[in-house]
Amino acid sequence: MKTLKILVGVAFIIAISAFAIDKVSNPPVTGGYAVGDVATDFELKNIDDAMVSLANYKDAKGFIVIFTCNHCPYSVAYEDRIIALDKMFKDKGYPVVAINPNNPKAYPDDSFDNMKVRAKEKGFTFPYLFDDGQKIYPQYGATKTPHVYILEKTAKGNIVRYIGAIDNNYKDASAADKKYVEDAVNALLSGNKVPVELTKAIGCSIKA
Amino acid sequence: MPKYAIYLVFLVTLVNCKGEQNVALDATDVYKSKGVEIPMYDFESFKPLLSINDGKTRVINFWATWCKPCVAELPYFELINSRYPDHEVEVILVSLDLPKQVETKLVPFLRKQKIESKVILLDDPDANSWIPKVNKDWSGSIPATIIYKGNTVNFYERSFTYNELEKELKKIL
């Protein structure tokens, strides 16, 4: 009887630890934000080694937060368009804030040092932040790169107004006839409702 | 030659007995190089593949060479492909590699890994329009897998071990 108890105990511990190991290796992205939710601020390290928070942007009307990275061909395909978005909207009050959510242990190309290299090569005009410890992206619910969250600054906080893709053609910017992010920010700037609030896209899975 | 004849007879019998529709997918393009042939589809031409009703179970895996977890689980799909007879289970690896990387990345990868399963390329940049048509719950991240037979369709936006994959397959077989 005693042996049985011990066996059950051992089995229980094994079951629990198996569950725990599973939890550690696959952090579940539970829900994340929906359009209309208040998005968390953060304090993340930029490629110039300074810490950046949304609260630092006193004059901003909102933000184009983009989870992106170095290694992903889809992210690379969109780099020039991300720069263009920043140039288009920074002065109007909607700067781009890029965040690399990947764990460099999973993707060495996405290390902080490689972020600096890539940003310099491409001449990024926006902060490129490192989600150290991979704590911010699960709160947003980002699943892949690139993944965009447009936030509108309000008295209640930064409210999510759009989630999804930059446009409807990852291969060819000139062939994209639906520019979701551009249209959304323009709508917000003119006080209108965002026409398309949620889009889906293929991207590289974020790896914690 | 006799081997082919048997296949042919078998195929004809299968079609005749069942009287099912013979689904032919029209590729928008076919990439051919060094013995590797990869048909390319846009979503409209690819879509019929998701609803073939011929009694066969299809395992359709969305992947790309740049997707690490996808590449990590490919051997399990290969194993399913080799362990189950062709007339019961068909494994189809749907690559989402960028077309310009077919020659530089995809083909060298398939040759190096000696991939035996059927590989096709889905090249349709307007992903927001077709992702929900594959499955309404799909966010668009890969790996993603569909296992279906007839009207029973299971969708998975996750990675598999071999045992997990086989367990899901057996639910449908």
Image (cartoon, coloured by chain):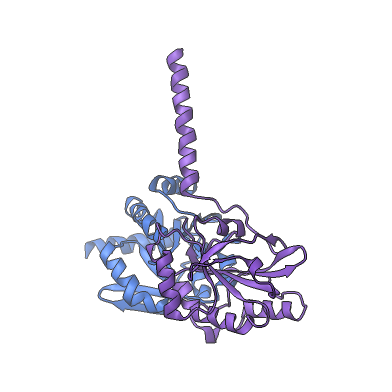
**Residue drawn at (57%, 54%), measured in percent from left and top?**
A29
How far across and how far down the image is residue B78, in percent? 34, 56
How far across and how far down the image is residue A68, in percent? 51, 69
Q: Is residue A3 left or right of residue A156?
A: left
Identify the hue of chain B.
Answer: blue
- Letter of the chain in purple: A
Pick the front one: B26 or A84: A84
**Going by the picture, which residue comes out furthest to the front?**
A50
With respect to residue A103, does A84 lie above or below? below
**Going by the picture, which residue comes out furthest to the bottom?**
A174
**Residue drawn at (50%, 81%), measured in percent from left and top?**
A80
How far across and how far down the image is residue B7, in percent? 31, 61
Q: Is residue B52 left or right of residue A153?
A: left
With respect to residue B70, does A119 lie above or below? below
Q: On the image, which quarter does residue A14 sit in?
A: top left
Q: How many numbered marks are there? A: 0
Q: Is residue A41 left or right of residue A116?
A: right
Q: Is residue A194 left or right of residue A48?
A: right
Whether residue A104 appears in this view of the structure is yes
**Residue drawn at (36%, 51%), measured in percent from left and top?**
B84
Q: On the image, which quarter does residue B4 sit in?
A: bottom left
